[in-house]
Image (cartoon, coloured by chain):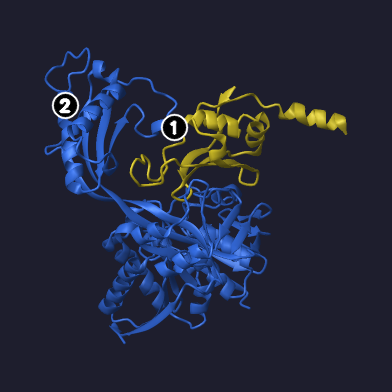
Chain colours: A blue, B yellow
Amino acid sequence: MTKKVKILAPCGILGYGFPVASFEQGMRDNPDAIIVDAGSTDAGPHKLGAGVAIVSRQACKKDLQRLVRASLGNRIPLIIGSAGGSGAKKHTEWTMDIINEILEEDQLSAKIKVIWADIPNERVIQSIMDDEIRPMGTNIGKLTEEIINETNGIVAQMGAEPIIAALKENPDIIICGRAYDPSPFAAFGIYHGFDKALSYHLGKILECGALCAVPGTAKDCIMGVLEEGSFSVYPTNPIRKCTVTSVAAHTFYEKDHPYILQGPGIILNLENSNFIQEDERTVKVTDSTIQSTEKYYIKLEGARKVAYRTFVIGGIRDPLLLANLENIEKEVEDGVREYFSEMNKADFNINFINYGLNGVMGELEPDMSIPKEVGVVFEVTAKTQDMASAICSSIRSSFMHYGYEGRKSTSGNLALPFAPSDIDFGPVYEFSVYHLMEVSDGMEMFSIESYEVKNGKIS
Amino acid sequence: MERLVDLAVVLRSKNSGPFSITLDILFDNIKTYKRVKKSGIISKKRIAELYRIKEEDITELVYFEKGLGIKITFNRKISSGTVGDRDVYGAQQHAPLFEIMIPEGEIADEDSKHKNAI
């Protein structure tokens, strides 16, 4: 077993960027791999549903140019998790295309592994029949064949296993489809013989870039060093440091529980981990524990189109109108619904977002005091774009001229900042699949493909 | 009595997956962490009242001493980014926590009582 391996994570999401000096400092510390997570469900279901990336192609290429050159130049592997953000076939191919373009432009050679994370609908339907699917939360419904047929492709988060299998063939670059965020990092540690719990815990920290440091950011580099019985982390940018609390508290971030983390086939428990300040900027971690789950579950993700949206942004300053805003909106909505009474009620939805009143929190807002001005968004979602557009236009014109009780401002109720005022938005998606599926092991659903680029040409 | 916002160094909300919102309250010293914990003020009941949600929709409320923090996770009524959602990242749902009032700490007293008991 190697005595020590170092992993450089340049940023929290591929395409977020990182200071060149931090990255160069990291490379001077001789890492054994460059690993970067590209994934997130944060930006909502649209990215997965519509098959688009979460960062621009330009930003992704800019980051990848630096990473590919450093990795090939120093003969250390580059591993990318959750390619293109959502990690479906389309997103993975988008990433492959950028890498191939860089290799071609620079006339470079590389052995590449691609690990696909798309799950065939038939497999999921079979699992529904075998009762091997369960929802990821108490507010998520049962998965049905109908939902699957409406969903625009399903992906699953891979564990470390397929990435370890790919590493065994010594590739230069591994492009993973959807992966559990810590998996690519954990795989590298486990492949080199290090403790599984520490490898996953390190992965959980590194996948966010320098977010575990003070000051924290996902747009800077972090180094992880695995040794027997411990790992340590430090930011490569001298303006940041890791502290015992910043590293211990990092596992709070975006997780439902602060020290129990469930992943593919594993439960990581950090309750008794020890965090030690090794030097001013480095924290050492020991005693993390991990359990393999009795049955191996992978997390499925899928999105479906649910409607088309049109919206209007407007401002209201009239105190008489603001005093009774929600009731007036209700009256306007009732009038529009009556006007379009030939339409099926289930085919459209009218929504008022009142910024300044409760726009951010909606029903959760405890403070409903009346403000000086309100920014309103009239949102209509409907079965077709034309329908959304027609109803939204009617809401806007009705509201503009609505003669509410006690009105003194008889010429118009809205300050519209833009002309035209109505914006056709296109399709709206929802996460339709967010369920666990039982599989035989971590390898079953994730196929590995290999190809080679020689002097910029795919062979 | 002090406001929670004046005691915590981090008070934030964020999605934990598209179907949940998680609230983090982090402190920079063990004394304040223990003061808030011992006050018992941050409970499922209190959070449910504050956010007008049912207690059973709060899936986690955990104190983690090593991280000097408290985490509360609750179910979203509408999942992230679909029709009717107002906060795709769930990043602005933390403000009601600010005004929670925490009584003065009685750690010293507690410690002396403990010693007396021994």
Most foreground residue, A404 or B39: A404
Residue A295 is drawn in which quadrant? bottom right
Farthest residue in the right direction? B118
Q: Which residue is mark 2?
A: A400
Nearer to us in this view, A375 or A391 = A391
Q: Which mark is residue A126?
A: none
Q: Along the polypeptide, which appears first: circle 2 or circle 1? A: 1
Front residue of B75/A183: it is B75
Expressed as whole percent of the image width and height from the top left, the position of residue A259 reads 61, 51
Give the amino acid at mark 2: Met
Residue at mark 2 to residue at mark 1: CA–CA distance:
28 Å
Judge whether residue A171 can be spotted in this image: yes
Residue at image mark 1: A364
Answer whether residue A54 is visible to the viewer in this image: no
Horizontally, residue A78 falls left or right of residue B49, namely left
Chain hosting mark 2: A
Residue A208 x, y percent position in the rendering: 47, 56
Q: Residue at x 57, y 50 (%)?
A: A243
